[in-house]
Image (cartoon, rainbow, N blue to C red):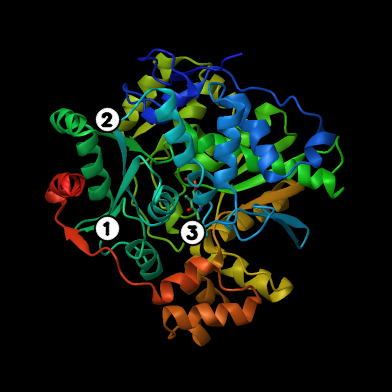
């Protein structure tokens, strides 16, 4: 049976999965959602014996119904290979009675690799299926993690080009080095003289430029998006929650009757929404614990039913969660509004206009699967330090926010259900914050790569290839432009060959 997708705002015809992936965002500004969430058809026993790749096929075939078995298996095989530093792809590590689901073993050592290593394959396959012969140009604005993961995913993928804009003075030194050393003839990385919002607005303006669109069409190009609103990023993220359940059954850490709680460090609400979809599919998830840093818009939302972005934007040590508009929440809003696109549109328009909206009590009742907790900067540091001192396990700042939320949840509720924490980045990606959390006096004055070596000694974890590579890698991208020049930079790059 074919599963079709429609916009949360109701202004568009139903499309196939491959069309939704090609398009990214619906034309009415809404997000694509499946008409229903399919149920897992496999027995827990069979699931428990499956590899990551087999689980991926089992889950993705139910969502991406217009891909053939051969196409999907090819995409999966090309994505989850030795780009990951472990055969199990997403290992589960038990520390102090909780399970850390390590999602950072891919090419750029953040969880974005879980979806962005397969998205390019899904997209080029979608282009073929829909007889698109033009080259696909991926435009991305990034504050650090998404840009690098998208570059790594799309580098040298035939039929695609990728252009990434980042705020020249707004990313960490390691993040910048990772991006400007990117290989691949089809890649372009540009620093802009502005902040992340400027980069994002510039990219949106290019997307909305109909004259440019026509010009590029004639030259054989069309734009697409690799950001987290693309359904082609969400579906691959469901896989690791299903896989985790299988592995917990296999190792007999969990019985078939038992539930598990999941804690997710949240920014754009993509990762936790994937866990929610996994629950709808039949994974016995109890609570979905949404962890925020000091930008606690979502915590407040789950407390009160009011989403209010009118507040100061706080820069924290978990920058990938510094966000006040969680785009993917719209998919949950649509669902709890019982697929009422009109209601969804009304609330999203209020968000644009007033920066806030309030859901109805009836909608709020349907949020009981979720609960929100947040961690302050001090609490985040403390849990990194304490966990290291007690167990020797070193976690990154984003994971620490989740660990803290999980701890607060357990203390407050007394719920002893087994708990899985989504671990979204390697500590090597945020070495400075992590090392300073462990011992600010000792490590405060060291340089970035000296800290990398100290972390290696401390944790006994080999320095990932992603970090080793950038120590000596030559800089390949040094374009810097004004915000107003972004469109020219895009046109120049596409004319170059
Ligand atoms: C992107 C990111 C997050 C937030 O994930 P969402 O899907 O946007 O909620 C958390 N941690 C890290 C390290 C990230 O890169």
Q: Earlier in the sequence, mark 2 or mark 1?
A: 1
In the foreground, 454 or 107: 107
Q: Secondary structure at mark 2?
A: helix
Packing grade of label 3 (10 A; few <14, some 14-19, many >=20) is many
**Disc 2 marks which residue?**
353
Q: Earlier in the sequence, mark 1 or mark 3?
A: 3
Q: Nearer the viewer, mark 1 or mark 3?
A: 3
The N terminus - image quarter: top right
Question: Residue 220 appears at what percent x and percent y?
Answer: 23, 33
Q: Nearer the viewer, mark 2 or mark 1?
A: 1
**Disc 3 marks which residue?**
108
Q: Earlier in the sequence, mark 3 or mark 2?
A: 3
Kindly identify the residue that appears in the image at 15 percent across and 48 percent down.
492
Residue 350 sits above or below residue 304 on the image:
above
- Spatial CA distance of label 2 from label 1 is 26 Å
Question: Residue 426 appears at what percent x and percent y?
Answer: 55, 63
- Spatial CA distance of label 1 from label 3 is 19 Å
Q: Secondary structure at mark 1?
A: strand
- Spatial CA distance of label 3 from label 2 is 37 Å
Q: Is residue 379 left or right of residue 46?
A: left
**Disc 1 marks which residue?**
167
Kindly identify the residue that appears in the image at 46 percent across and 26 percent down.
18
Kindly identify the residue that appears in the image at 78 percent across and 37 percent down.
47
Q: Is residue 406 left or right of residue 265?
A: right
Q: Is residue 439 visible?
A: no
Question: Residue 274 appears at what percent x and percent y?
Answer: 58, 36
Q: Nearer the viewer, mark 3 or mark 2?
A: 3
In the foreground, 129 or 37: 129
């Amino acid at each position: 049976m074919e599963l079709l997708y429609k916009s949360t705002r109701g202004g568009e015809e139903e499309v196939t999965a491959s069309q939704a992936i090609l398009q990214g965002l619906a034309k009415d500004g809404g997000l694509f959602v499946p008409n229903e969430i399919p149920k897992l058809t496999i027995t827990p026993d069979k699931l428990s014996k499956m590899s990551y790749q087999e689980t991926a096929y089992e889950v993705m075939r139910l969502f991406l119904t217009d891909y053939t078995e051969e196409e999907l298996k090819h995409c999966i095989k090309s994505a989850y290979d030795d780009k990951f530093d472990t055969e199990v792809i997403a290992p589960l590590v038990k520390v102090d009675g909780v399970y850390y689901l390590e999602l950072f073993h891919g090419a750029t050592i953040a969880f974005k690799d879980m979806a962005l290593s397969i998205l390019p394959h899904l997209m080029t396959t979608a282009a073929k299926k829909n007889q698109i012969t033009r080259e696909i140009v991926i435009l991305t604005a990034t504050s650090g993690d998404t840009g690098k993961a998208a570059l790594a995913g799309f580098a040298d993928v035939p039929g695609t080009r990728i252009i990434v804009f980042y705020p020249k003075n707004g990313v960490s030194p390691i993040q910048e080095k990772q991006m400007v050393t990117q290989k691949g003839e089809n890649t372009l990385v540009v620093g802009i003289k502005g902040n992340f919002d400027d980069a994002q607005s510039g990219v949106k303006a290019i997307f909305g430029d109909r004259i440019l669109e026509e010009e590029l069409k004639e030259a054989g190009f069309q734009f697409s998006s690799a950001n987290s609103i693309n359904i082609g990023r969400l579906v691959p993220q469901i896989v690791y929650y299903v896989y985790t359940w299988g592995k917990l059954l296999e190792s007999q850490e969990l019985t078939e009757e038992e539930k598990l709680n999941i804690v997710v460090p949240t920014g754009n609400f993509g990762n936790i929404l994937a866990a929610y979809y996994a629950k709808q599919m039949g994974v016995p998830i109890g609570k979905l614990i949404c962890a925020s840093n000091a930008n606690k818009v979502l915590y407040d939302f789950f407390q009160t039913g009011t989403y209010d972005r009118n507040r100061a934007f706080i820069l924290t040590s978990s920058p990938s969660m510094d966000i006040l508009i969680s785009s993917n929440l719209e998919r949950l809003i649509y669902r709890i509004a019982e697929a009422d696109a009109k209601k969804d549109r009304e609330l999203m328009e209020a968000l644009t206009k007033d920066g806030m909206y309030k859901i109805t009590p009836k909608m709020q009742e349907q949020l009981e699967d979720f609960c929100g907790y947040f961690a302050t900067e001090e609490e985040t540091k403390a849990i990194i330090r304490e966990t290291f001192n007690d167990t020797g396990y070193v976690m990154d700042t984003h994971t620490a926010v989740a660990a803290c939320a999980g701890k607060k949840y357990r203390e407050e509720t007394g719920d002893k259900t087994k708990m899985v924490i989504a671990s979204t980045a390697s500590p090597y990606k945020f070495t400075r914050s992590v090392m300073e959390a462990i011992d600010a006096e000792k490590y405060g004055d060291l340089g970035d790569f000296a800290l990398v070596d100290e972390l290696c000694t401390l944790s006994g974890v080999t320095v990932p290839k992603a970090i080793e590579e950038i120590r000596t890698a030559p800089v390949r991208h040094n374009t810097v432009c004004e915000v107003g020049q972004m469109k020219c930079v895009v046109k120049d790059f596409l004319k170059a060959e």
